[in-house]
Image (cartoon, helix red, strand yellow):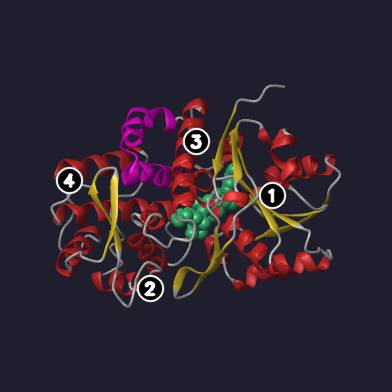
Amino acid sequence: MSIARQTVTVALGDRSYPIHIGAGLFRDPACLLPHIRGRQVLIVSNDTVAPLYAAAVRSLLEAGGLSVAAVTLPDGEQFKDWQHLNLIFDALLQARFTRKATLLALGGGVVGDMTGFAAACYQRGVDFVQVPTTLLSQVDSSVGGKTGINHPLGKNMIGAFMQPRVVVIDTDVLATLPAREFSAGLAEVIKYGLIRDLPFLAWLEAHMDALMARDPATLREAIARSCINKAEVVAADELEQNDVRALLNLGHTFGHAIETGMGYGSWLHGEAVATGMLMAADLSWRLGWLSQADVARVRVLLQRAALPVVAPGELAVEDFLRHMAVDKKNVDGRLRLVLLRALGQAVVTDAADPALLRETLAAGAGLGRATVAGGAA
Ligand code: NAD
Ligand code: GLY
């Protein structure tokens, strides 16, 4: 059987790994099995994804002679915490898994982040592989080794860098993804165009209708181009030490404030990032870096992807500022934001005038201004 596939490599020396992208990869043992070193595999999934796809993945592993156990977590960002992380350790210990075990993350970013963190901790580190099943996890969270859980006071505040040994992206699984989740994934796809890949931004503008229709070839190209961007950034700054990887956080400081302020699970991560990216574009316009037409271009593309472009009115400016103060990019109490010098050119800066930031927050939250720059939202 011939399977249409692309492979992108994350170049990290002897920890380099492939990202296989294509339709029907759950039927192809060659994608997964060569990257599993021991004989024990724990499939970590959730109660939505496991009934859909765990049997196919288990068959693939068992056909390769591996011993397989599984743990199913409750589905939701609100369960990305210590208590539910512990369920993975319970399963590993109950099955007497050793240091040679591999953890397999089957699900979206929540399952992937928790599984990777569990792999980093269990017996001080075991292998893990990513089998992402949401668009967001396929284009972003499964690649690059950021793992962790939330704390009530801040999102993704507890975690570790832990690279997977392979990422297997079967694009067929997107057929069952709800529309809202699909759009949330598109936010991270659009992000790559905005921060570093202007031709990709133009390509997305030309292909957004096909993407929204989930055309398989267009989707595969969007996923591959996103993974190439992510792999390049991770190879340049794996541990986020030199402000290259931090650019991937465009919109995230605003977005995390929305997620934390509204309660985890209320706004989807990608939705919060989408609104946050428009707020970042709005602030970049106030700084004189973007034109109103640039901001409108961002807003229109987000809207075409069925993403929200107005921040929740429940959050006052002071709420935003309080949540934004808890951000991993901040240094010595100074707020650092990813903004746009131009479309396709992001920068990390601590130089944003606080008064302009307040204007953006007021506009974005619908407090004082009904819309953000670029027209009615
Ligand atoms: P998610 O993991 O909550 O998945 C979204 C929903 O889709 C869930 O209900 C899930 O069960 C369901 N689902 C998953 N695959 C499905 C499928 N094929 N068919 C039907 N339903 C399916 O959310 P997400 O958007 O994938 O990930 C968001 C998380 O990722 C957040 O916690 C965020 O912090 C994290 N994240 C991490 C990184 C990173 O670099 N590690 C990057 C971006 C986001
Ligand atoms: N999603 C942000 C990062 O991987 O750095």
Report the number of numbered marks.
Answer: 4
Q: Please say if the residues under marks 3 and 2 sit with CB atoms less than 8 Å apart.
A: no
| Position of 124 relative to 271 (above/below) | below
Q: Earlier in the sequence, mark 3 or mark 1?
A: 1
Quadrant of the rendered image containing residue 121: bottom right
Disc 3 crowd, CA 10 A, few/some/many (<14, 14-19, 20+): many
Q: Please say if the residues under marks 1 and 4 sit with CB atoms less than 8 Å apart.
A: no
Q: Is residue 200 magenta?
A: yes
Q: Earlier in the sequence, mark 1 or mark 4?
A: 1
**Which residue is tagged 2?**
326
- 3D distance between C-alphas at marks 3 and 2: 32 Å
Q: Please say if the residues under marks 3 and 1 sit with CB atoms less than 8 Å apart.
A: no
Q: Which residues are magenta?
A: 185-211
In terms of secondary structure, where does tag 3 sit?
helix
Along the line of sight, the residue nearer the viewer: 251 or 268: 251
Q: Earlier in the sequence, mark 1 or mark 2?
A: 1
Q: Please say if the residues under marks 4 and 3 sit with CB atoms less than 8 Å apart.
A: no
In terms of secondary structure, where does tag 1 sit?
helix
**Which residue is tagged 4?**
374
Q: Earlier in the sequence, mark 3 or mark 2?
A: 3
Q: Is residue 73 left or right of residue 228?
A: right
Across and down, in percent, residue 290 comes to 17, 47
**Which residue is tagged 1?**
50
Residue 224: image tag: 3
